[in-house]
Amino acid sequence: MDPFQLEKPGYHSTYHNREIIMNWEYRTMKFPATGGFLGGKFNEAALTDKLNELGQQRWELVAAFSTHQGYGQSRDIVAILKRERR
């Protein structure tokens, strides 16, 4: 028997013919850059710690981007997170 086979031939899972709709809630967060007049550097350890803290609360990071300032510096990192709504 194939170990990845989910059901026996002739049997049907209760999830067949059933639509599963996920309901998400979203959150955006801004992590500011520090140093210099307009920022430019990030505390990578603090960012990692915050994302791990949010992960414990079931938040999943789905996208992140920097607001580019120029010459390799960023003003902020914007993170978009989601989790299943209960």
Image (cartoon, grey):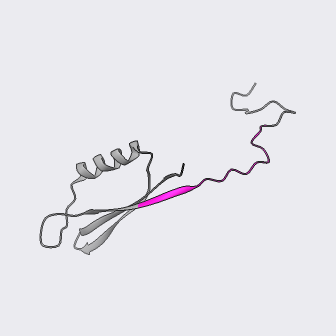
Residue found 73% across the figure and 28% down from its top: 2
- The one nearer the camera, 82 or 86, is 86
- The one nearer the camera, 2 or 57, is 57
Residue found 78% across the figure and 44% down from its top: 16
Q: Position of residue 18 (x, y in %)?
A: 76, 48
- Above or below 18: residue 38: below
Q: Position of residue 41 (x, y in %)?
A: 19, 62
- The one nearer the camera, 47 or 5, is 47
Q: Position of residue 56 (x, y in %)?
A: 39, 42
Q: Position of residue 67 (x, y in %)?
A: 31, 71
**14 magenta-colored:** yes
Q: Residue most toward the right?
A: 10
Residue found 18% across the figure and 68% down from its top: 39
- Above or below 3: residue 16: below
Instruction: Name the image quarter holding residue 28.
Output: bottom left
Q: Is residue 65 left or right of residue 41?
A: right
**Is most of the magenta stretch helix, strand or loop?**
loop
**54 magenta-colored:** no
- Above or below 69: residue 45: above
Q: Is residue 4 left or right of residue 23?
A: right
Q: Which segment is the magenta one? A: 13-27
- Above or below 15: residue 84: below
Q: Residue most toward the bottom?
A: 70
